[in-house]
Amino acid sequence: MKGSFRLFCAAAAAVVFLAGCAHPQLIDMGESSAVVAQELGEPMAKTPMPDGTERWTYSMQPFGQEVWWLFMDKTGSVVGREQGLQEKYFPLIKIGESTEADVWKLWGRCAQKYEFHLVNEHAWMYRFKDHGGFDMAVWPQFDTKGIVRSLDVTTDPWKDRDSDWMAFP
């Protein structure tokens, strides 16, 4: 009986917590930047865009597979929203030119960081679903100066496990 009550309390707390969760997709067009910041917190990055808007970056990493961009006009109102972690945006990262700061402005927090000591490089892993719905990862790899040296796409190592190979006859 006591265990059931604890389970009920834990479940109720989870429902209350999840009901209060905000997500960039739930933000209405025209909403003020103040309300957005109150609902979602401060963005990972605020980037001025050529059209005069400002792109706010919200990363759902490490456990999500999305990075959301909200676009604010000069009055501070939401005028656009887009899932920024898509293959069509990968060319925005220029090999030999883009920096860690550029990648951070584009996608924010990554799912995991990797160090490659033998080649003095490191990589950030961003998890995403491709246009076919497959679990993938994109890896900007940086040199010791923080310059992108490669951008690779693989299956998501968090989802792609070899442990089920014995399940087949």
Image: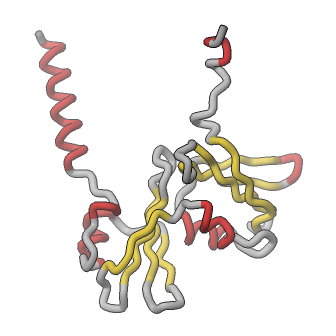
Residue 121 point in image, percent of width and height: 80, 55
Q: Is residue 162 above or below residue 121?
A: above
Quarter of the image for residue 79 reads bottom left
Q: In this view, does 62 lie above or below 11?
A: below
Residue 162 point in image, percent of width and height: 67, 24
Residue 125 point in image, percent of width and height: 63, 50
Quarter of the image for residue 148 reads bottom right
Between 10 and 47, the one lying in front of the other is 47
- Horizontal side of 18 relative to 84 (left or right) equals left
Single out the residue that lies furthest toward the right: 118
Residue at the spot x=24%, y=76% of the render?
31
- Horizontal side of 34 relative to 43 (left or right) equals left
Q: In this view, does 115 lie above or below 9?
A: below
Quarter of the image with the N terminus in it: top left
Residue 88 point in image, percent of width and height: 61, 66
Quarter of the image with the C terminus in it: top right
- Horizontal side of 148 relative to 43 (left or right) equals right
Residue at the spot x=44%, y=63% of the render?
68
